[in-house]
Image (cartoon, rainbow, N blue to C red):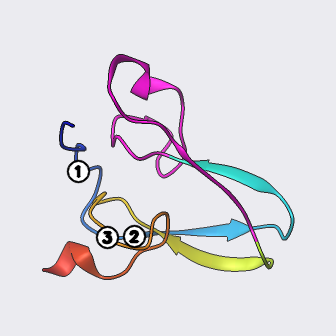
Amino acid sequence: MSTAKRAGDQPLAVELEAGKNYAWCSCGLSSNQPYCDGSHKTTDFTPVVFKAEESGTKYLCTCKTTGNSPFCDGSHSK
C-alpha cells in the first residue's frame, strides 16, 4: 500500500455533532481537510467513516500518521 500524503503539520479543530457520521480523509489528497472529498478514488485509500459519540470540539489528524484515526495522537510531532 502506498503512503498517505501529509496534509498538515498540526491537527485541525473541528466541531462534531453527536450521532452524525463523518468521513475523514486517509489519503491526504482532499481539498476539504480533514474530511474526504473523493480524491482517494485514484489511490488504494478509503476514507475512515465514523459516528461522533458526543458533540464538541475534537482534533482530527492531518499528518495521516496517527495510530488513533481519525483523531490526532501527537504523531505529527515525532
Q: Give the crowd class for mark 2: few <14, some 14-19, many >=20 residues within 10 Å.
A: many
Do the residues under discs 2 and 3 have CB atoms within 8 angstroms? yes
Q: What residue sits right under mark 3 in the picture?
A: 10
Identity of the residue drawn at 51% across and 42% down: 47
Q: Which residues are magenta?
A: 25-52
Q: Which mark is residue 11?
A: 2
- Going by the numbered disc 1, the residue's amino acid type is Arg
Q: Secondary structure at mark 2?
A: loop
For residue 68, above or below residue 49: below
Q: Which mark is residue 73?
A: none
Q: Give the crowd class for mark 3: few <14, some 14-19, many >=20 residues within 10 Å.
A: some
Q: Main secondary structure of the magenta part?
A: loop
Q: Secondary structure at mark 3?
A: loop
User: Residue 30: x and y, percent?
Assistant: 43, 35
User: Residue 73: x and y, percent?
Assistant: 36, 81
Instruction: Report whether 27 appears left or right of 39.
Output: left
Farthest residue in the front direction? 1
- Please say whether residue 28 is one of the residues in the magenta stretch: yes
Q: Which mark is residue 6?
A: 1
Q: CA distance from mark 1 to mark 3?
A: 10 Å
Identity of the residue drawn at 35% across and 72% down: 67
**Placement of the C terminus among the 4 image quadrants:** bottom left
Farthest residue in the right direction? 19
User: Residue 41: x and y, percent?
Assistant: 43, 20
Instruction: Report whether 28 appears left or right of 52.
Output: left
Q: CA distance from mark 2 to mark 1?
A: 11 Å
Q: Quadrant of residue 14?
A: bottom right
Identity of the residue drawn at 29% across and 49% down: 7
Q: Earlier in the sequence, mark 2 or mark 1?
A: 1
